[in-house]
Image (spheres, helix red, strand yellow):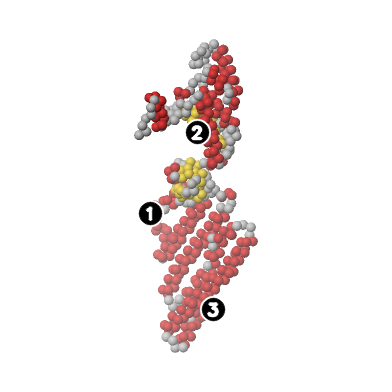
């Protein structure tokens, strides 16, 4: 007698006993089935108990002794639990067909259910490994700013796609290869359904390969109202935490199809750019007189420049026999030119301005609002709050200094300005209504 025959006899032992006691064969068959199912359930419970108290504990003890943290992440993603289900499933797979020997339709249904469960179990095991891998890679410095989440999602989509193919093939009773071939006609529909996923997959690859965006980058995407730090890059979306602690989700594909601003270059550079203008009234610009020269010479940081410059101009005018009675003749300094030099010197003396990067004070194209005098420099401190403080400090000084050079800032007139004008002109105010 071989092992299989002995197992069949053991399965039918209780049934034969009941028949020998005069019990109806049909009743004996179902009672024997019930008893075998109860025994199998008890065996599975016992095996599960052993797995939880031996296999999983052994895996945890093993992971505690290893130097890598990868196995710790596998425990967090329940990898030992899923692996531990293999033995109970194997027992059920080998035992149930003998228990249901007299029920061919039930055996067919059992194989159908158990095959689908095995497919799902394989998916869960792979998902557990991938999640553990994702957690482990995030601890590595080289993967800190990489879109690992996107790649994990792509692999999981492929795994689930194959799992669904096997499940559908199991339901339809077709071979998997033939079933895939039969889907050829529906490929256009599938491409339409998974359009966003495919676009996201392509975008994730391009974002990573071309190093367009990293986790931790500060980006500004006006279309989606995003202005903050990238916290997550997935297959479908990029998550941005704005500076007001709100979150904005941006489609991954839009990072390569539309324009946005990435501030990484500023964060990696030695300084952060300050670029701002003040508008000077054009009719306040003039050639300086001797009285003006004496007054401006009292401004210490440009006094030596003024004297050197004036000596150079006087020498030129003398050499070329220029009639200096009219300031328009020959060469002469202007209050705006001296003001620009003052700002340039002030910036070069400012402790918060980076001296090894550009420091430019330039004269832009005049507009209906006046002459823009633009300041372009870089602050040493790139932190946002300190940067704003430095910028404000510089322009507080620049705006306050304008009047010392007999210049005026442009400002659109308000209602109070109009009332003050009429009051001075006609000697009375205007009704505020």
Q: Relative to 389, say whether 400 is above or below.
A: above
Q: Quadrant of the N terminus?
A: bottom right
Q: Answer whether residue 212 is visible to the viewer in this image.
A: no
Residue 432 is situated, as x and y percent measured from the top left of the image, at: 37, 33
What residue did someone put label 2 on? 276
Q: In the rendered image, which residue does mark 1 sit on?
A: 189
Asked whether the residues under the numbered discs 2 and 1 touch, taking CB atoms below 8 Å apart as contact, a structural biologist would say no
Q: Position of residue 59 (x, y in %)?
A: 60, 64
Figure check: 284 above or below 265:
above
Residue at image location 59% in from the left, 33% down from the top:
350
The residues tagged by marks 2 and 3 sit, at their Cα atoms, a distance apart of 93 Å
Q: Is residue 59 left or right of residue 163?
A: right
Which callout, 3 or 1, points at the residue further toward the start of the chain?
Answer: 3
| Pointer 3 residue | 2
The residue closer to the viewer here, 263 or 379, is: 379
Callout 1 crowding tier (Cα within 10 Å): few <14, some 14–19, many ≥20: few
Q: Residue at x 54, y 32 (%)?
A: 397
Residue 292 lies, with reference to residue 76, above or below; the image says above
Work out whether residue 401 or residue 122 is closer to the camera in this orientation and state it.
401
Disc tally is 3
Please indicate, yes or no, whether residue 103 appears anywhere in the rendered image. Answer: yes
* Residue sitting nearer the eye, 107 or 246: 246
Q: Is residue 27 above or below residue 208?
A: below
In three-dimensional space, the C-alpha distance between marks 3 and 1, rounded to whole angstroms, equals 54 Å
Residue count near mark 2 (Cα–Cα under 10 Å), binned few <14, some 14–19, many ≥20: some
Distance Cα–Cα, label 2 vs label 1: 53 Å
Closer mark to the observer between disc 2 and disc 3: 2
Going 51% across and 31% down the picture, which residue do you hit? Answer: 399
């Amino acid at each position: 007698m071989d092992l299989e025959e002995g197992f069949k006899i053991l399965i039918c032992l209780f049934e034969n006993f009941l028949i020998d006691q005069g019990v109806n064969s049909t009743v004996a068959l179902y009672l024997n089935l019930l008893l075998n199912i109860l025994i199998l359930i008890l065996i599975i419970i016992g095996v599960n108990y052993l797995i939880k108290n031996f296999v999983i504990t052994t895996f945890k003890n093993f992971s505690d002794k290893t130097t890598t943290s990868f196995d710790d992440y596998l425990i967090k993603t329940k990898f030992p639990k899923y692996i531990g289900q293999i033995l109970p499933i194997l027992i059920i797979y080998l035992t149930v067909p003998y228990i249901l020997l007299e029920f061919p339709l039930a055996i067919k249904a059992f194989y159908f259910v158990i095959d689908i469960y095995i497919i799902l179990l394989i998916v869960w095991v792979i998902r557990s490994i991938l999640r553990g891998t994702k957690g482990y890679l995030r601890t590595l410095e080289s993967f800190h700013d990489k879109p690992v989440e996107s790649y994990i999602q792509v692999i999981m989509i492929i795994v689930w796609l194959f799992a669904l193919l096997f499940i559908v093939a199991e339901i339809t009773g077709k071979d998997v290869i033939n079933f895939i071939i039969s889907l050829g006609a529906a490929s256009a529909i599938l491409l339409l359904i998974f359009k966003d996923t495919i676009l996201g997959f392509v975008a994730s690859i391009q974002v990573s390969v071309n190093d367009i965006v990293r986790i931790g980058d500060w980006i500004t995407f006006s279309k989606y109202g995003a202005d903050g730090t990238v916290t997550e890059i997935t297959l479908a979306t990029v998550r941005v935490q704005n500076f007001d602690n709100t979150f904005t989700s941006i489609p991954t594909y839009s990072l390569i199809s539309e324009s946005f601003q990435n501030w990484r270059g500023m964060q990696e550079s030695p300084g952060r750019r300050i670029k701002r203008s003040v508008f000077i009234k054009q009719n306040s610009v003039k050639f300086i007189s001797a009285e003006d020269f004496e007054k401006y010479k009292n401004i210490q940081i440009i006094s030596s420049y003024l004297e050197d410059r004036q000596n150079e101009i006087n020498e030129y005018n003398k050499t070329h026999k220029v009639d200096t009675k009219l300031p328009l003749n020959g060469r002469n300094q202007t209050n705006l030119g001296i003001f620009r030099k003052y700002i340039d010197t002030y910036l070069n003396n400012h402790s918060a301005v980076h001296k090894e990067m550009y420091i430019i004070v330039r004269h832009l194209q005049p507009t209906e609002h006046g002459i823009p005098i633009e300041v372009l420099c870089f602050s040493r401190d790139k932190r946002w709050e300190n940067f704003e403080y430095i910028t404000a400090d510089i322009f507080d000084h620049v705006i306050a200094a304008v009047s010392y050079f007999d210049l005026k800032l442009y400002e659109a007139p308000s209602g109070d300005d109009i009332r003050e004008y009429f009051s001075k002109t006609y000697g009375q105010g205007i009704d505020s209504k």
